[in-house]
Image (cartoon, helix red, strand yellow):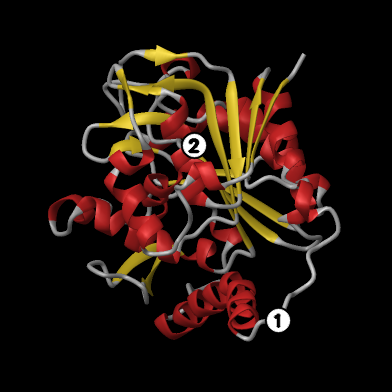
Amino acid sequence: MKIQDRHYPPSAPGPDEVERLSRRVFLKRNAGLALWTAALCCGIKLPRPAGAAEIPDIAVVRGERGAATRAAVDLLGGMQRFVQPGHKVIVKPNMSFAGRPEDATDTHPDVVREIVTMCKEAGARRIRVLDHPLRRGERCIEGIREACEVHGENIVQAVSNKRFYQTAKIDQGRQMKSTDVIWEVLEADVLIAAPVAKSHSSAGVSLSMKGMMGLIWNRGIMHSRYDLHESIVDLASLLKPDLVVVDASRVLSTNGPGGPGRVLRPDTIIASPDMVAADAQAVAMFEWYGRKLSPRNVKHIRIAHDRGLGRMDLDNLRVKQIQLG
């Protein structure tokens, strides 16, 4: 289902407005970090939120995928930590292929439905589940669309028309300085990444950072004009999820992103507010191409860590793992 005109104002925002929206989102998401940095430089200790010591950096839950999705987010403080009443929320799963859930090329519909349900419970005013599919849009989104229909027929949308994209500057871009982004993403209050865990022939793995390519118009340029890994990190500096929920209920460990390949079935959900940490945890937990990898082996994860967009040093992070009955 393509985005319907009634969900947008009569005319798309101009470049100045999109630049303002992009800057607003960037400032909102980095204001807390700036405050802590300034406080530390001055020797000031800011109070920690009640219960913050018990909240892990990464939550890992094994069990039935819907229940595990909810449990993983609950371990991080619940969806209300990320979504407030009245918020506009974008959920970005993998919906680029028209395979079956067992093929592990796309996020499982049960995971996306649970995320949308939790956002509704937290009081979100508007929720969109968006992707720019690589195959015929209607076929790619039909499973997730059917799963989410209980919450509204227009929630899940394939954005395949360029008029719904707007140019945004990438202020922290090293190579890619701007790109055309779905403009509704730029004005959202909350961005949730919900990738399936899978291998990728060019990027090594496709997880939350790589998945942001599904929110832009021309992803091909990231392969042809720029270093793919550098441009993935450039894009992640603009489209930085507030929450990552990695669907590792099935893992396409070879021949990704489109398969068919070897599918592992660890029945696991990984959640974190840190996209780099979430991706690093997924890399470290599973077998890729028949062997174990370190997060440092994946170039874009290493670059993102080095550029301060998140952390891949898992030994220094609090990881909470539980098994559902």
Up/down of 41 relative to 297, above or below:
below
Up/down of 40 relative to 302, above or below:
below
Q: Position of residue 191 (x, y in %)?
A: 58, 56
Q: What residue is rendered at 20% in x and 56% in y?
A: 221
Q: Position of residue 255 (x, y in %)?
A: 26, 22
Q: Which quadrant of the view contains residue 134?
A: top left
Residue at which label 1 appears: 44
Classify mark 1: helix, strand or loop. loop
Image-based side of 173 in relation to 91, left or right: left
Q: What residue is rendered at 50% in x and 46% in y?
A: 277
Amino acid carrying mark 1 in the image? Ile
Disc 2 packing (10 Å; few <14; some 14–19; many ≥20): many
Q: Nearer the viewer, residue 261 or 308?
A: 308
Image-based side of 145 in relation to 44, left or right: left
Residue at which label 2 appears: 281
Q: Position of residue 290 (x, y in %)?
A: 29, 16
Classify mark 2: helix, strand or loop. helix
Image-based side of 153 in relation to 224, left or right: right
Quarter of the C terminus within the rendering: top right
Amino acid carrying mark 2 in the image? Gln
What residue occupies the far left of the structure in this picture?
224
